[in-house]
Each structure stands twice: as C-alpha cells, then as structure tokens.
C-alpha cells in the first residue's frame, strides 16, 4: 500500500464534521428564535417601540450569530 | 487492489455529512417557527400592525436562514 | 475479490444519508407546526383577519420550507 | 465466501435508511399535530368559524406533508 | 508501517472535534437566546429602560460568549 494512499484514507473521517456544522446551526436557530419570538411579542405589547425593539433584537442576535457562524466555519476547517 | 478503487472506498464516509444537513434544517425549523409563531400571535393582538410585524419577522428570520443555509452548504462541501 | 464487487461495498454507506433527510423533515415539521398552530389560535382571536393571517403564515413558512427541502435535497445528493 | 454472498452483505446497509423514513414521519407527526391541535382549540373558541379554520389548517398542513413525504421518498430512494 | 504514517492516521480522528464546536454553539444559542428574549419582554414592560436593559443584557451575554467561543476554539485546537 502506498503511503499517499493510506494518507488519503486517514483524512476521510472528515464528513463527521458536518454534524458539528449542523449542531451549530441548531444553536443559532434556538437562540435567534427565542430572541426574535420575544421581540415579536414585545412589539405587540408596545407597538410604538417597534423600531427600537427590532434594533435591540438585532444587536443581541449578533452575539448568537458570532458563535454559530464561528462554529460552522470551525467545522468546515476541521473537516478539511 | 487498485489505487483508484481504494480511493473510492476512502471517500465513501461522505453520506454521514447528510446528518449535518438535516440538523441544520432542524435549527432553521425551530428558529423560524418560534419567530413566525410569535409573529402570528402578535398580529392577532395588534391587527393594525400586521404589515410591520411581518416585515420585522422576515428581518429577524434572515439571521436564522443565514446560519442554517450556511450549515447545509458546509455539510454538502464536507461530504464531497 | 473482484473490483466491481468492492466498489459496490464502498458505495453502500449511502443509506445513512436518509437519516439526514429525516432530520430535515423533523425541522420542517417543528417549524411549520409552530407557525401554523399559532396562526390557528390567532384566527380564533381575530376571526375577521383569517385571510391575512393565512397569507402571513404562508410567507413565513416559505423560509422553513427553503431550508428543509434544501436539506433533504443535499441528503439525497450526498447519498449518491 | 462466494462472490454472490459478499455482494448480498454489501447491499444490506440499506435498511438503515428506514430510520430516515421514520424520522421524517416524526417530523410530520409533530407538525401536523401542532397545527391540528391548535385548530381544535380555535374551533372551540370560535364555533361559527369551524369550516374556515379547517380549511386553513389543511392549507398549512400541506406544507408539512410536502417536506415529510419528500423525506420518506428520499429515504426510500437512498435505501435502494 | 512507518512510524510517521501511523502517527498521521492516529491524528485523523480529529473531525469528531467539530461535534464539540457545534455543541458549544448550541450552548451559546440557548443561553444568549434566553437572556435576549427576557430582555425583549422587559423592554416591552418598561419602555423607558430600553437602553439600560440592552446594556445589562450584553454584559450578561458576554459571560456566555466567553465560554461558547472558548469551547469552539478548544474544539478547533483539539482537531488540529
């Protein structure tokens, strides 16, 4: 068996990393969903604050996006 | 055993990446569902805000779509 | 062992990809179910908005369908 | 080991795809259950809207059926 | 088998580390989502405190971000 070939076999456990990317997306979904859902309810209770609430929601969502996208990117790099 | 054949064996752990794509879709479902459901309830409470609430919901949903679709795409690339 | 046979063995990890398709369908079910359920309750609270609420629900559901169907399609491609 | 026998072993990873079909059915169950349950409650609250609510429920359920049935079909194709 | 080769094989279980990155992102999503969602509801109840509540939310979210990003980074280093 050639060395290059075995090397290739060894590096092919990579697809399991896709599970990590999927899990990161679940995290993003749970978090953004919770904030977004609460923002909707808040807008219904204080209609005149709709713009401000949307702004605050996006600021807070940014923290989730950071971890989730970072997790997806790391999964991709790890798979390589 | 031919080199090309073993190579093919090695690259066939890929299907496990589909689990990642599925998990990413779960994340999208949970998140969009939560925001959309809350938007529906908010519309029922403030019927005159229906248009604005739908707009805000779509803005917030966009953040989930980004991570979820990114996760599905990464799963697909990783599987390759 | 014939070359064609080993090739067949190698390509048979594919069925695991079906789990990904199933997970994507779970995501679609959770999300559409949450939005649809909330839409039903909203219609009961504001009967005169039934048409508008159904329209908004379908718009929001489209975002879930996109990720879920995309996930199923990727699972199918990955299995190939 | 005869060639035919090994061939049979090789093609028998397929049944794992049935797990995907089952998961897709779980997704359908969760989603349709949520919409249907909410529709029931809505009908109880607004008895005169029973027909319209049933119609809306069926429209929204169609979106879940699409993903769930698609997931089951893909599981079946993948198993083949 | 050469020592260098076996070493390489051994280090290629790395992709499983991506699952850790994904789990860390789930943790971040749940935590930030819960704080952010509660912050939204609090803003709706006390509209004049919107700025202060957002500030407090970000301070509290920082503690979750620290652990989640640390988890993602460790997963990445472990995979290497």
Image (cartoon, coloured by chain):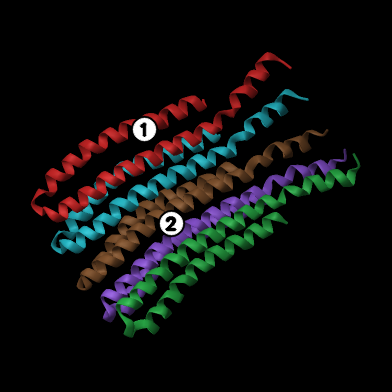
Chain colours: A cyan, B brown, C purple, D green, E red
Label disc, if present, on residue E69 of the rendered structure:
1
Q: Nearer the viewer, mark 2 or mark 1?
A: 2
Find residue E16 and report its horizontal and vertical position in percent.
54, 33
Q: In this rendering, would B26 be left or right of E45?
A: right
Q: In this rendering, would D70 be left or right of B9?
A: left
Residue pushed farthest left?
A: E48
Whether residue C33 is visible, yes or no, is yes
| Same chain letter for marks 2 and 1 | no
- SS category of the residue bearing label 2: helix
- In 3D space, how far apart are the residues under numbered discs 2 and 1 (Cα atoms)? 24 Å
Q: Residues within 10 Å of mark 1 (few under 14, many from 20)?
A: many
Label disc, if present, on residue B29 of the rendered structure:
2
Q: In this rendering, would C14 be left or right of E73?
A: right
Q: Chain of mark 1?
A: E
The residue depicted at 38 percent of the width and 67 percent of the height is: C37
- Residue E53: image quadrant is top left
The residue depicted at 45 percent of the width and 75 percent of the height is: D59
């Amino acid at each position: 068996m050639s060395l290059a070939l075995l090397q290739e076999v060894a590096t092919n456990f990579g697809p399991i990393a896709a599970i990590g990317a999927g899990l990161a997306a679940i995290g993003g979904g749970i978090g953004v969903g919770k904030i977004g859902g609460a923002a909707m309810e808040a807008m219904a209770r204080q209609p005149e604050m709709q713009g401000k609430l949307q702004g605050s929601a996006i600021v807070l969502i940014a923290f989730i996006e950071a971890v989730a996208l970072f997790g997806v990117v790391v999964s991709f790099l790890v798979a390589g």
